[in-house]
Amino acid sequence: EIVMTQSPATLSVSPGERATLSCRASQRVGSNLAWYQQKPGQPPRLLIYDASVRATGIPARFSGSGSGTEFTLTISSLQSEDFAVYFCQQYDQWPPWTFGQGTKVEIK
Amino acid sequence: EVQLVESGGDLVKPGGSLRLSCAASGFAFSDYSISWVRQAPGKGLEWVSSISRASTYIHYADSVKGRFNISRDDARNSLYLQMNSLRAEDTAVYYCARSPIIGTRWFDPWGQGTLVTVSA
């Protein structure tokens, strides 16, 4: 099973600043990685797939990069609606499809 | 609009059973793989089970294998999860989620979820 590890657990950022979230896979997963955003009381929403492709309707301030075992989600200028929990997920070797434990982006 | 709506969540005693349903609309349900993903209170996401188009491939997480059964009814545009021998650690919000037409990869969209509580 591929273990996904996200860091940091919590990221404190001021509105308008840049946020950089990391996700590491225990084995190489190519570019088979997705990112999700989850707000309280809501289901996850797909942001990025194939490591760097924005899903339909996702603003350009969200970008994904990386391949192999190291991945990054960057939010270029945080808006108030971006404060949420973010999860990464690999779909290279399955089952199981595995998620990271999440990074909470909070207001500084 | 693509929509997934879960139902069937409830409070159940350890050892009990429950059947969850997921009603799909707005897309050709039979063409897609659909999955169940759960989230324990205050915790992260855990993939539970997936079923491919025509039920050709079915997968389960080790934590539920032998206790849960996934099925689909394409005529009713519905997905089901039969949950038996429930344990306290099965307590979670259960989401159904669609994958891209190429197969189970990422999950998009997700339903709103249904809460399953296993407690005496």
Image (cartoon, rainbow, N blue to C red):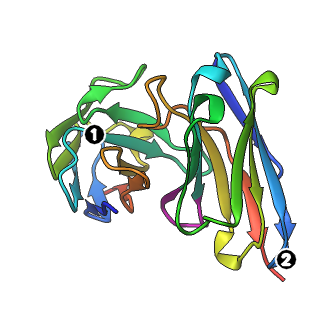
**Left or right of B112: which side holds A108?**
left
- List the single residue furthest toward the bottom: B120
Q: Chain of mark 1?
A: A
- What residue do we see at 30% from left, 43% from top? A15
The residue singled out by tag 2 in the image is: B13
Identified by mark 1, the residue type is Asn
Crowding at label 2, few (<14), some or many (≥20) Cα neighbours within 10 Å?
A: some
Q: Quadrant of the C terminus of chain B?
A: bottom right
Occupied quadrant, residue B3: top right
Of residues B45 and B73, the one drawn nearer to the viewer in this rendering:
B73
The residue singled out by tag 1 in the image is: A32
Residue B93 in the image: x percent, y percent? 66, 57
Residue A83 magenta:
no
- What residue do we see at 64% from left, 29% from top? B54
Identified by mark 2, the residue type is Lys
Occupied quadrant, residue B91: bottom right
Q: Is residue B27 above or below residue B5?
A: above
Q: Chain of mark 2?
A: B
Q: Secondary structure at mark 2?
A: loop
**Does the image show residue B115?**
yes
Q: Is residue B17 above or below residue A67?
A: below
**Left or right of A28: which side holds B14?**
right
Q: Secondary structure at mark 1?
A: loop
Q: Quadrant of the N terminus of chain B?
A: top right
Residue A61 in the image: x percent, y percent? 27, 29
Q: Which residues are magenta?
A: B39-47
What mark, if any, has residue B57 been given in the picture?
none
